[in-house]
Image: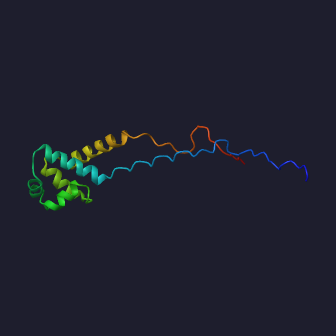
Amino acid sequence: MTNQAPNHARVIPLRPDASPTPAPAPAPREPLWRDLVGDVLRRERLAQERTLKDVADAARISMPYLSEVERGRKEASSEVLAAAAQALGLGLGDLLHRAHGELVRVTSRRTPVTRGVSGSARNGLCLAA
């Protein structure tokens, strides 16, 4: 029998804290313009206590199409939007201004997105040239 000591090596990790970091939450989806405009049209119609049929007839567009515009399913032309707005007693500028206000309201609730690397400490190996 030989008296050899077991071969042990000392391991020094390159990344001291190898615990997994949680993945960042996915960025919220930007609202679509057609959804915002549709919401404004629907809110205004309901505030006036009018039916889809009434507004569609006044705007000279089909009731199913107006419904799809209100639900954000169709990307309406400026002519259709102007007709729907006028049927509700609004100008096209009023409709777009309200949709813009809704866009600002929805997006201002989000936290700002930062680009690049923040000043937080990073674990791991960093090489610079």
Q: Position of residue 106 (x, y in %)?
A: 33, 42
Tell me if I can see residue 14 in this picture: yes
Q: Of 71 and 100, which appears nearest the observer? A: 71
Looking at the picture, tell me which residue is in the foreground, 68 or 57: 68
Residue furthest front in the image? 1
Q: Residue at x 61, y 38 (%)?
A: 121
Side of 122 where 83 appears, left or right: left
Question: How far across and how far down the image is residue 115, in percent?
Answer: 52, 45
Camera-nearest residue between 92 and 44: 44
- Looking at the image, which residue is at 17% across and 58% down? 66
Q: Is residue 116 left or right of residue 55?
A: right
Total numbered circles: 0
Above or below 12: residue 66: below
Residue 101 position in % (x across, y down): 29, 41
At x 15% / y 51%, what residue is drawn? 86
Note whether residue 91 is visible: no
